[in-house]
Amino acid sequence: MLYGEYEHTIDRKGRLIVPAKFRQALKTHDVTSLFLTRGLDGCLFLFPESEWRLAENRFKQIPFTKGEGRKFNRLFFSGAVEVTIDRLGRLLVPKSLKEFAQIKEQVVIVGVSSRMEIWSKAKWQDFYESSRQSFEEVAERVMVE
């Protein structure tokens, strides 16, 4: 449902315009509520509510008796906020999440099928440059026939 890569800026108040194609996809699927949280690799994850609930259910299965599970759930859920897109197509990114992702002004919003990732432009460029050469090798390791 969410595909592509878009460059945007975040304003002084922490508002970010969600790409029009993503807003249309969300509207088509009747998504009104989104969840924003700390992601992996230094980005933020933005889930439509239905995808958030699926992830939440998976993560609740991690035994709280395991230290790594407790740590992951604490960091993942403590940073989570429910957000909505305003009539101008913007959502508010809390200061703590901007700091986590080292977002200043320039951002890249990436569609990863069921979620969006919000990256500082510099971190996205670093990730992309360091990963693109190994794309085929990674595909061979993760794709199971």
Image: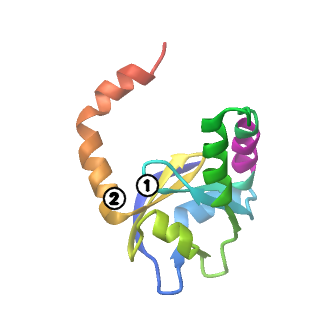
Residue at figure coordinates x 30%, y 48% from the top left? 128
Dot 1 falls on a residue whose secondary structure is loop
Viewer-nearest residue: 23 or 41: 41
Residue 1, disc? none
Examine the image and state in which quarter residue 35 appears: bottom right
Q: Which residue is mark 2?
A: 123
Q: Is residue 53 left or right of 145 when viewed as pictured?
A: right
Viewer-nearest residue: 31 or 39: 39
Question: Vertically, is 56 above or below 11?
Answer: above
Residue at figure coordinates x 73%, y 33% from the top left? 65
Question: Vertically, is 37 above or below 8?
Answer: above
Dot 2 falls on a residue whose secondary structure is helix
Residue 46 spot, x, y in % from top left = 59, 57
Amino acid of disc 1 = Gly
Q: Is residue 49 left or right of 90 when viewed as pictured?
A: right
Examine the image and state in which quarter residue 119 appears: bottom left
Question: Which residue range is magenta in the image?
Answer: 50-58
Q: Is residue 73 left or right of 96 when viewed as pictured?
A: right
Amino acid of disc 2 = Lys
Residue 27 spot, x, y in % from top left = 69, 62
